[in-house]
Amino acid sequence: MLTLLLVLHVQAQGDWPAYGRDPGGARFSPLTQITSENVATLQVAWTYHTGEPDMAGMSHRPPALEVTPLVVDGLMYISTPAGHIVALDPATGTERWRFDAGVNPHRGYGDFASRGVSFWRDARAAAGAPCAHRIFAATIDARLVALDAASGKPCAGFGSAGVVDLRAGLRVPPLEFEFYEVTSPPAVVGDLVITGSAIADNTSFAPASGEVRAFDARSGALTWTFDPVPRDSTDPAYRSWQGGSARSTGAANVWSVIVADPARDLVFLPTSSPAPDYYGGLRLGEDRYANSVVALRASTGRVVWHFQSVHHDLWDYDNASPPALVTVVQNGVPIPAVIQTGKSAMLYVLDRTTGKPIFPVEERAVPASSIPGEVASPTQPFTTVTPPLSPLHYSGADAWGPTPESQAACRAILGALKNDGAFTPPSLQGTLVVPGNVGGAHWGGVAVDEGRALAVVPVNTIPAMVQLFPAEGFNGDSIRRSDADHGITDFEYTRMRGTPYIMRRRLIVGPTGLPCTPPPFGALVAVSLKSGAIAWRVPLGTMGDTPNLGSVNLGGPIVTAGGLVFIGATLEHVFRAFDIETGRELWKATLPAGARATPMTYEVGGRQFVVIAAGGGGPFGAGDAIVAFALPAR
């Protein structure tokens, strides 16, 4: 019996059973076969092509293969944007089964991605019974699908023939089909499956409601619902929405990954901004539960605590990254903690049981709004021990360009924008927003090595410009012609329905296509969880012909007990490994496309593999490859 238990334990150590490997999403693997000494010899072990069609030439946004595979009990599980759920042999990449959820890929989804699936064991089911082990997948068109993990067949007793329609029962349904999606895998806690949603939140003052819902893992029955925009006037957070605006506002949804502490019966929600992103005159106040880490009792959906990272968001500063549950040591005392990174470039370390900051946070005065009808929050929460992960301020004097001409052009662009420091609100003049709407720290999130007390985060340093136009009398054709005359064709325009304004924005790049602010344009940052100080910071990738400029990046890291950080994320078609102690790049490999996905690692047959999905879509390039790397076979 002891031998059997030891074997099962070793097998579990080699698996990657959840999106962040463990329910708390720390993204740490205890595997040590691949180390800083031998990582340079990693080579491609196998490649699997999902067979997704190349839709880069379509009029809608192309799909992005952002899946982080799972490996459980000898099978690998992946999902694709178009709704294919696939089981592979993790040793060879050979397909074992494939299920087609029947997603229509041409509905114009705003964020056409699927970041993975979830695994659940039914403790009541007999061994080998159908659907005793289940794969749960939330499709882009908002359906929750339950499949038998061994065969890929739908679990007939779950919902309707294995499917729950996540659009059904919403307090406010979406105005248009493509305005409501699900891109992240659900959380599994006990016998519950918990889902969020992705909402087109800048299209209207009152888009779809952003409820988080828990379903019975066996039957698919709804167990509880939590709306991050509080509807109950007795809820303390309700008063933070002035004029009763919580009754009509939408979004504040959870489109990122939900993490859990099953032992404490807690789930942790990284909530996004309320609608619309850039004008809050119809939702004055702090807008509590939005832009927050919200801890819920997993069994009931009741709020235990919440911490708001941005008050009255006017910058699209969603909590886009998953929280990470870890243990930090302060004065020799271990403290269960939640780490949350944000687009605002802050890293918050909170007590997991109370939500109180472990590393100090203080409210600092920030600029007021100049938009009629808008009242920006007078303060925002700044971490005081951990420095910002990326810059919070640029000016015309900081303008950068690879040539004197491009630098002069960038100086003119930056100098023309309103720029009163961090959290400068949108304006009619046009505002320099630092960090931009992609972050700062972005949806790639954080990976944590508790033993070394290091948290590793990818960041962007590129700012954005945001400008509001009165909707009355707006002549879009004339303005776009003016944009084109100035050589600018990448402005994004959005009519924020129900508000007096139209928004336009763009990331700030110069005439060469490179950012107007100094390199590195993207970086990998390690934070000490002992002191809160930056342990190291290195450029992540490059843009242009000059090495080490750093790259705009999307996608997360993982860390291993072998002393390594693995990450793709950059615009280059490259996968990298870094030394976790120093940040030194130790290895890189060319991929068939860019990789916005977070990688994972596992062991099977005595061999450790590292896997990443390549095919980030858009500027990352089209692709459909799952690529596995390993040390040379003996």
Image: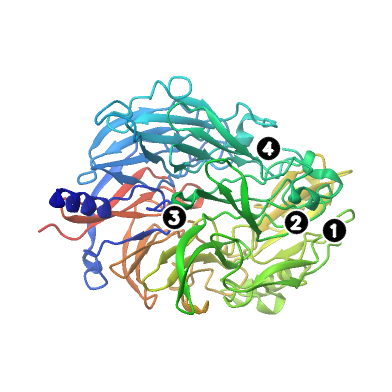
Tell me the element at label 1: loop
**100 over 563 or under it: above or below:** above
Camera sees residue 159? yes
Q: Which residue is mark 2?
A: 312
Compared to 51, does 349 lie above or below? Answer: below
Q: Quadrant of residue 485?
A: bottom right
Mark sitting earlier along the chain (3/2): 3
Above or below residue 578? Residue 299 is above
User: Does the residue at mark 3 contact the one at mark 1 (Cβ under 8 Å)?
Assistant: no
For disc 2, the neighbor class at 10 Å (few under 14, some 14 to 19, many from 20) is many
Question: Which disc is residue 209 wearing?
Answer: 4
Are the residues tagged 1 and 2 within 8 Å (C-beta)? Answer: yes
> Which type of secondary structure does the marked residue at label 3 adopt?
loop
Q: Are marks 4 and 3 in contact (CB under 8 Å)?
A: no
> Are circles 4 and 2 on residues that touch, CB within 8 Å?
no
Left or right: residue 431 compared with residue 542: right
Badge 1 or badge 4: first in the primary sequence: 4
Left or right: where 530 falls relative to 302: left
Q: Name which residue lies at 68% across and 37% down.
A: 209
**Res. 375 mark:** 1
Q: Secondary structure at mark 2?
A: loop
Looking at the image, is mark 3 or mark 1 earlier in the sequence? 3
Residue where numbered disc 3 is placed: 25
Q: Which residue appears at 23% of the width and 41% of the height? A: 89
Q: Nearer the viewer, residue 103 or 235?
A: 235
Mark 2 is on which residue type? His
Mark 4 → mark 3, Cα distance in angstroms: 26 Å
Q: CA distance from mark 4 to mark 2?
A: 18 Å
